[in-house]
Amino acid sequence: MWKDRILATLLAVTITAAATAAVVRFTPKKPAFTPAQLEQGVTFDAAGVAAGETVASVDGNDATAELYVFWLGSECANLANYGVDVAASWDTEIESGKSLRDFVQEDTLMAIKQQLVLENLCTRYGVTLSDEDEAEIAAQRAEYIELYGGEEAYLAELYRLGIGEEGFLRLSRTDYLYKELYNAYQTPGSAIYASDDVLHAYAAGLGYITVDQILISTADPVTKEPLDEAKCAEKRALAEELLWRLRDSADPLGLFDELADQYSEDPGRVTNPHGYTFTEGRMVSEFETAARALGENEYSDLVQTQYGYHIILRRPLDVSAAANAVREQYFSALFLGEIERAELQTTPALEKLDPETVYTALQNAQNRTENAD
């Protein structure tokens, strides 16, 4: 999920801070970067594009050059973690006719698009950060400043990551915005809230079903080892008797509950007293095939699996269970749908930011220390 990517990226920043803290010299002979460099960004000298210059937008929400540089650096770091020699050749084909340069550019712009869409969704639905969120961000900033030994060293480290303080604050807010958007999505009455009925219909479209069962187990309840042949025969006889009683009943659905409560040896019945709600591939194949062959309120013949003998009852799809099962998935689909529909507009400034040039500028910045002449 895209959220994971954002979280992982900001975590990487934290890890970078912790890893380099040991080598930071708190009384440098000379600052690594001038105030003008910190303000203009790493790509200004290399490409003539200042940190705050707009390079892309979605529905009027602009992304600056520093966001592009940061996400490009993150993408290159991810590739390096997978063993790609980023500096080797930017024209090397790495994916069906796509060069490394094209791949990095495409992924960087996608990361920017995702961030802009998230911000736009929050604006659309009136989602903002809480006071607690703002306090946490401020506390994190203070921790970074203390970690690096001062404001100047902190800004220099951000510069090495390709981002200024304003851009880094925007990135920091991204995680919290995502969290608050998801909280709003789960809050009844909010503009983005999805009701159980909506989620129930979505789950049905994904193939979710609800089934109950009477399980007569053919395994020892303690050791889980298969029972001997004689015991298994007794178990089958009991299962067949229960099935016969259902067939002979004027109210088989009512009787099913009684028999399940009395005879079923399914340990999951304690937490799932009204059956299981699941989608394809979640149950053993014999069980799932039999369950999906049933209509609602129909029960099966005996179904044998590795667990024993089952009598399966297909119930109407449980609204609450189905909604809970797909709540996160529906949110992800909603968010991804917004990303797919959004159109990323780029500016001429982006054309100056060749990925190789940007990456080289980032490497030069990261290799420069406070003691540099």
Image: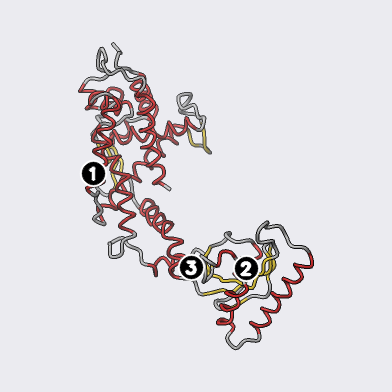
For mark 2, give the secondary structure: loop
346 in relation to 182, above or below: above
* N-terminal-most mark, 1 or 2: 1
Q: Is 40 in front, or is 1?
A: 1
For residue 204, the mark is: 3
Give the CA separation, mark 2 to mark 3.
29 Å
Instruction: Judge depth for marks 1 and 3 and give the one in front.
Output: 1
The answer to whether any part of residue 213 appears in the image is yes
Write down the residue under mark 2: 265
Residue 125 vertical position relative to residue 216 in the rendered view, above or below:
above
Q: Residues within 10 Å of mark 1 (few under 14, many from 20)?
A: some
List x then y, in percent, for residue 11. 38, 37
Q: CA distance from mark 1 to mark 3?
A: 40 Å
Q: How many marks?
A: 3
Q: Is residue 104 left or right of residue 223?
A: left
Q: Earlier in the sequence, mark 2 or mark 3?
A: 3
- Position in image of residue 100 (x %, y %): 46, 32
Circle nearer the N terminus (1, 3): 1
Residue nearest the observer in this picture, 258 or 276 = 258
